[in-house]
Amino acid sequence: MSAGNSWVLERQRPQALQIRLAIPADVARIFAIRTAVCENHLSMQQLAKLGITEQAVLELIHTQDCTWVAEAAGCVLGFAIADHAEACVFALFVKPQHEGQGAGSALLHQAEQSLFQTQAHIWLETSIDSRAAQLYQRRGWQIETLLPISTEGRSAGPQDAVFVKHRPAA
């Protein structure tokens, strides 16, 4: 992605928000954000069990243009990862203290635009009770499937759903 494809959102904030491709130096920040969130929280150990490691994200950064960060005043506020092979928004997380300030919307827009270059339909999965689900629905995503509640050895949490979005007509 060239610098010309990066976009800036300046709505109701003193600092410009920039969306840019992640670089290797962002990996530690990405994991700090991922493990700091309140909703859908996972520890480094839980992420590693799922194959989500610093090395795996570093490999994505080196081999694919699919990982972005939202940055303002030199501070990384959130990140998104698109999985082009699966046509999905694999991850989108914002630092809790920066939620509701536009970083999530800007990252979602970037991931959608990237996926819609090659896909007519894209999807993601999240809890139907989350703030993220509300964001996705405001941005035109629709619930396609409610997933069975899985306890996996712990008490049942909120129900997850698959959300879909179709490429807008040209």
Image (cartoon, rainbow, N blue to C red):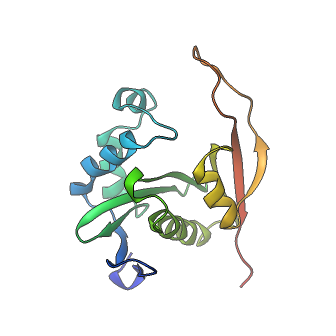
- The percent coordinates of residue 156 (x first, y second) are 65, 23
Q: Is residue 56 visible?
A: yes
Which quadrant is the C terminus positioned in? Answer: bottom right
Q: Is residue 95 visible?
A: no
- The percent coordinates of residue 153 (x first, y second) are 58, 13
Residue reaching furthest to the top? 153
- The percent coordinates of residue 158 (x first, y second) are 66, 33
- Which residue sits at x=42%, y=43%? 37
Q: Is residue 22 above or below residue 106?
A: above
Which quadrant is the N terminus positioned in? Answer: bottom left
Tell me how many marks there are.
Answer: 0
- Which residue sits at x=75%, y=80%? 169
Determine the image quadrant of residue 8.
Answer: bottom left
**61 or 110: which is nearer to us?**
110
**151 or 11: which is nearer to us?**
11
- The percent coordinates of residue 43 (x first, y second) are 38, 31
Q: Is residue 139 above or below residue 9?
A: above
Q: Is residue 130 above or below residue 107?
A: above
Determine the image quadrant of residue 69.
Answer: bottom left
- Which residue sits at x=76%, y=52%? 143
- Which residue sits at x=63%, y=28%? 157
Left/right of residue 85 with respect to residue 52 in the rendered view: right
Determine the image quadrant of residue 164.
Answer: bottom right
Q: Is residue 35 above or below residue 154?
A: below
